[in-house]
Amino acid sequence: MPSALSSHPLYLVCGDKGGVGKSMVSVALVHHLAQRGTALLLIETDTSNPDVWRCYEQEPGIVSRSVGLDDADGWITLVNLCETHPDHTLVINTAARNNTGIARHGDILNGAVQELNRALVALWVINRQRDSVALLKRFLPSIPTATVHVLRNLYFGDSEKFELYNQSALRQTLEARGGRSLDFPDLADRVADDLISRRLSVARALRELPLGNRAELRRWEKACAATLGAITELDETDHGRDGLQDAAA
């Protein structure tokens, strides 16, 4: 009988398209986990525009590293960081160009997941364009050990407008594998711009921004907690463990 998985999963935030909102999802996920007292290792793989890393590089209690995933060396470094931080949950923010690196070198991570004894969870962020669905279909075979959840970024409209994904056979396949289709809340542009342009963590922004901005950020924080909690709480149950074992079978 396989041993129980570590309670510190690897979260891979991806989407393979620039501008779908991966950085905002990573920021929200790091904040959500940190608020729960989780020890975190943030891996920023967008070495050209490391926005998430810059927001959290000096945040107490969060270890931040920048690692490129364009070649095998980067994937080896990633796995080694996982091994040397066994008591940390990992959040990996991927770059739009990482689809090529995942296709070529994802087996390095796939091969190490069982020995690391961690669940691998991918959060695939989509907009309403056909590419979001087509690239997801291409991604799934690259990381077969992952439980994949889709986040419809409501910056691009209400969830019912994501018709290409909502009505797709791919959605049925993903949900049959244990993944969920969830809505990621929109944040007012001026507040989102504050976070990224001023390199602010959510916690710091809640202390420093003007009152109106803070009120909007608190609304978004609460909405993000509802969405992300549906994923992170699942990972702490037998259901999450079974999902990994079924995918690896």
Image (spheres, rainbow, N blue to C red):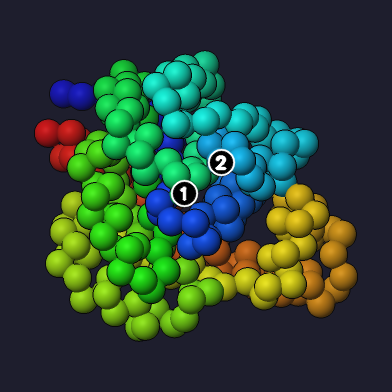
What is the residue that sits farthest to the left in this orientation? 249
Who's the residue at 84% across and 58% down the image?
207
In the rendered view, does 28 fall on the left or right side of 82? right
Question: Is residue 238 or residue 145 the one in the foreground?
Answer: 145
Q: Which residue is mark 2?
A: 46
Q: Residues within 10 Å of mark 2 (few under 14, many from 20)?
A: many
- In the rendering, at what x and y percent does residue 158 appear? 44, 82
Query: As displayed, is residue 161 above or below residue 190?
Result: below
* Label 1 close to label 2 by CB (< 8 Å): yes
Q: Amino acid at mark 1?
A: Ala
Q: Quadrant of the C terminus?
A: top left
Q: Amino acid at mark 2?
A: Asp
Question: Is residue 100 or residue 58 the one in the foreground?
Answer: 100
Would you say residue 60 is visible in this rendering?
A: yes
Q: Which residue is mark 1?
A: 96
Who's the residue at 16% across and 40% down the image?
246
Tell me which corner region of the image, top left, top right, bottom left or bottom right, holds residue 59.
top right
Q: Quadrant of the N terminus?
A: top left
Who's the residue at 72% across and 46% down the image?
55
In the rendered view, does 101 fall on the left or right side of 23? left
Label 1, label 2: how far apart the Cα atoms are: 8 Å
